[in-house]
Amino acid sequence: MLSQAQSLFSQMTSQLMPHLNSCSSLLKVAYFLLVLSPIILAAEWWRKGRGKKWEDASQYEFMQKDTVILVSPDDKVIGSSSKVTSHTFSKSTPRGQLHRAFSVFLFDSSGRLLLQKRASSKITFPDVWTNTCCSHPLHGLTPSEVDGPSDLPSVPGVKNAAVRKLSQELGMPIGQISKSRLKFLTRLHYWASDSVTHGPLSPWGEHEIDYVLFYQLKPSEVITINPNPEEVSEIKWVTPTELKNSLKTGLWSPWFRIITSRWLLPLWWTDLSTLMTTSKYVDTKTITTFDPTEEHAGGGGKAKRVYLKEVVRNVSGGEGGKKQGGYGKVVIHKESKFSQVVRFDEMLSGFRLLYSRPLTSNLGDKMLVERFDVDDLKWCDEMLGKVSRSFAAVIRQLPGGLLVDVMVFYLVLRALDTVEDDMEFFDGNEKKVECLKEFCERAFDDEDFVIEGCGEGDERRLLEDFKHVRGVFKDLGAGSQRVIRDITERMAGGMAEFVGKDLGEGTRDIKEYNRYCHFVAGLVGEGLSRLFSTSGLEAPHLASQIHLSDQMGLFLQKTNIIRDYLEDFVDGRAFWPQTIWKKYAGEEGLGAFRTDKVQGLKCLNELVTDALELAPDCLAYLSQLRCSEVFRFCAIPQVMAIATLDKVYNNPDVFTGVVKIRKGLSCKLILNTVDHEGVHECFGRMALSIIKQARVEDPNYERTVKACNTILEIVGQPKVGISFGAKMQVLNVLACTGLFSSGKVLLTSYEGGNWDGRMLPNLTDHGDVAALAVFFACVGFLICFMMVGEVFEGMEGDGGKGMKRSSSAISRTLVEASKLVE
């Protein structure tokens, strides 16, 4: 653009100069100012990147519209952003925002590589030669272009993006490039300012984790290439020798130079046949990081080179443990190990749950072995553990007959959910609706019914080997079969209702939000109540408590939806009601909370409060259960849910990852959920914690406090203030500090020879004696704290009931210990 302006100015000057020679000096100055002003202003506007080039409106609009996937340095998805924002190099973002990209290298059957020259209209790195196609997977598209660690090396999302851009840039029709033949090789992390184009203070640049994909045409394969002039100005096929010579002159993209010098010429191209037919060069475990060359450092934020040399970062990857949807694609926020270690009561709970008081499985019951096919039953039990994140253990502790009913019920609904959840398998929503209907009609009775290729990992295997579930289902009682068929059919109908809806921006309002939760969770609660009654373990009237069972399901589902905000968002869908989040984000979209956490927390707290208002109905449902195993089965997920709500309330980490409660706390909650008092204690403690976190300035403060006070009225008001358990927690931390400090003193003394080879220090050394006393005192305190940890919490304002509960807990521990000794 600057060269065009200079040419225009030269032409105008040459034509008008003869006339100006006869004018006064003042008129000459006025003329030059008149002509130069708009040119200078336009050039400066262009140099600073204030807007688009005049002839490049479409390119800039694309950059504003397209939403790239933001990632952490270890390639975990953390959000999304527009191309403009992510590629802006400024003082606030000196290297832009780290996002995901891909680079496709297309070879013909003889091994020549197709190169493209980026069009001059491109905003970033125009007029440079580079590989066949390079761009970004985008957020919110169908089919999804978001991958998680478990998607390596298949990377279906990146491949979807590659096929889309090959069509857009090079005119290759969709379908000519086979996704299955696109071969992932490795990832590189680099940044580069576009200083060559826009000057040393360039406002544009790249900061990417780049996925490298190779593709080779077969000998007789013909492919259509029709470059889009707005994207590509030239193309050419080159051999390795031709590329080496070409790299000596001209402009080349910085990422292509990195890939070429590090891998393409020395390794990959020389062994192309092996590369395309084996996994020899596939690397899913590392990300190689590069600084830019000196010419691409700097930019609008004056960023400095930080790595100075190639850095290889080890990251997790592979096929194991694949999960459906967005699971595993974002950061998991966990508390530090120290935070867990100092909570000895929780650590003890973990050991007790694992060794002395496990949730034992009743699946080995002799009656079940005689009634059901052993192989089918074993397969269902194995699959239950693989596809269930948390329910497997509580299902297995149910009494024999009910256990199998609930296990089959869960697996059937999990299979149905896999069909509904797959965003890529079906060619349109109508096909998915047909499949949901067909599942209800054929899955239970048709021996030939199978769905192949739908879902991922263990969920796919569940659908493909559904015959094992069908085999166990046929041996269930007639009443249980009717319940499972009915709930499956109604749930499929609800899923079909939502399949055609655009959930990219959430549900429409609170009514639709509740309706969605009813179909995916409320119906599950109803079905379970009917199975409980059918089994005879619970009263017949429980099956008619539809409202309470529905509310209990909604409580769990809403908790998951709140916690999984980012996980759902990066997968291109959302469930937060628009009538709620738009009050805080306006027209900026649901993704605005990732940066505007003040407004985001207001929205988050309102949704948490909405879920808390369901707690009284959940407690009312639990109060009607009479079978202890059924009570635990229902109560454990409920206490986990309210503990999660306490964790996410007013927590900005929700917008940058998935927030989870400590594993030790989970174990403690499971052990304490043996009766109504234990459940009430948990609900009361979490409600009180939320009240303490609530801020008066929060627009939902009064509503939140009211919801928590309602819970406290039901469970009994605990004392406000620093609880005895909290005081003991402080002593616990002090004891840990004393233990480590005294241990270090004793170790130093021993290594210094002060013990004269004995097992104990010299008693005449007062320092060693003091350290030994502190050491044993701390050990004694911590042992006592672990043994009677429940006592401290049970003493909090319950009129001595907690002491009785704690005494019984200690008695149970002693009895179990004696059993172990025997």
Image (cartoon, grey):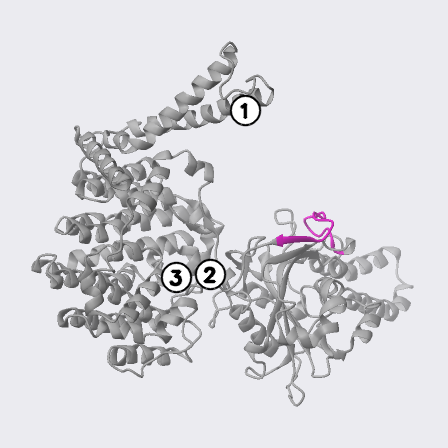
**Which image quadrant for residue 649?**
top left
Task: Say what secondary structure mark 3 lies in.
Answer: loop
Q: Name the residue: 75% across, 64% down.
A: 257
Q: Of discs 2 and 1, which sits in the foreground? A: 1
Task: Examine the structure image and report whether residue 298 is included in the region drawn in magenta.
Answer: yes
Callout 1 amino acid: Leu
Give the magenta part as a residue range. Answer: 296-313
Q: Residues within 10 Å of mark 3 (few under 14, many from 20)?
A: many
Q: Position of residue 732 (x, y in %)?
A: 38, 28
Callout 3 amino acid: Ala
Mark yes or no: residue 620 visible: yes
Task: Examine the structure image and report whether residue 569 is included in the region drawn in magenta.
Answer: no
Task: Say what secondary structure mark 1 lies in.
Answer: helix
**Foreground residue among 728 and 821:** 821
Residue where numbered disc 1 is placed: 747
Q: Is residue 652 left or right of residue 534?
A: right
Residue where numbered disc 3 is placed: 574
Q: Of discs 1 and 3, which sits in the foreground? A: 1
Callout 2 amino acid: Val
Q: Is residue 322 left or right of residue 647?
A: right
Q: CA distance from mark 2 to mark 1?
A: 51 Å
Circle nearer the N terminus (1, 3): 3
Q: CA distance from mark 1 to mark 3?
A: 56 Å
Q: Name the residue: 80% across, 66% down.
A: 3
Q: Position of residue 85 (x, y in %)?
A: 58, 57
Q: Name the residue: 15% across, 49% down.
A: 620
